[in-house]
Amino acid sequence: MLETDRQVLVLNNDYEPLNVCNVRRAVVLVLLGKAEVLHADGIALHTTDKVIHVPSVVKLRYHVKRPLPELKLTRRTIFARDDYTCQYCGYRGKELTVDHVIPKRLGGSDDWENLVTCCRKCNLKKGDKPLHQTGMTLLRQPRRPRYVPYISLSKYIEGTRNQVWRNYLPFFSDVTPSAD
């Protein structure tokens, strides 16, 4: 992976997680004096006249005022909430889909409490039937995440796997996977 393709956590000046950007953008913020490096990866970029340590976390020197974002219900946010894991069998992989726990034909809605990540095999097995007719059970009850991060939900969950970033990301058990 090119060092400029690495991800950098950007914090507001009050240490609130604000964004995730690439190394190039983070280095520009630091060189312009708009941000300071809180953590570096120990990797260096060499220019013609200087060595720049690759940041992992930067903090803005000024406060960016942003309205609290709204967490939208999308396939991507359902997958992120469920940690890209089938909620029936625990399969993790690329062949995932979204399943209605209560089928639409039985009055099931398109909301956080009725949609789960599902592998194709379990989706075919469950079909258009309610759970009690299939003998299948959910690994955990689906619900709307309580935490709405400024960064996207998928980047937030991915960021919780970074040991350094964990110091700056709030922990919420309903969207934060257990440490690997």
Image (cartoon, rainbow, N blue to C red):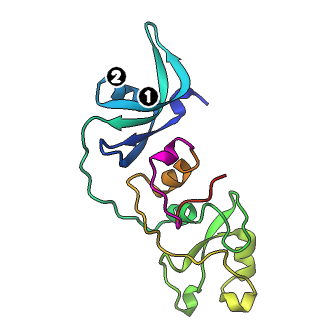
Vertical comparison of 17 with 94: above or below: above
Query: Hey, what amino acid is under mark 1?
Result: Arg
- Residue 100 vs residue 67: left or right? right
Dot placed on the residue nearer the N-terminal end, 1 or 2: 1
* Residue at figure coordinates x 57%, y 43% from the top left: 163
- Residue 179 vs residue 157: left or right? right
Q: Give the residue number, with chain letter if any, for mark 2.
A: 31
Magenta-colored segment: predominant secondary structure: loop
The residue carrying pointer 1 sits among few (fewer than 14), some (14 to 19) or many (20 or more) residues within 10 Å by Cα, namely some
* Residue at figure coordinates x 52%, y 91% from the top left: 107
Quarter holding the N terminus is top right
> Residue 157 location, x and y as percent?
53, 55
Instruction: Tell me the SS state at disc 1.
Output: helix
> Residue 161 location, x and y as percent?
58, 48
Residue 167 in the magenta stretch? The answer is: yes
> Residue 164 location, x and y as percent?
53, 41
The residue carrying pointer 2 sits among few (fewer than 14), some (14 to 19) or many (20 or more) residues within 10 Å by Cα, namely few
Magenta span: 163-174
Residue 59 in the magenta stretch? The answer is: no
Query: Which numbered marker is on residue 24?
Result: 1
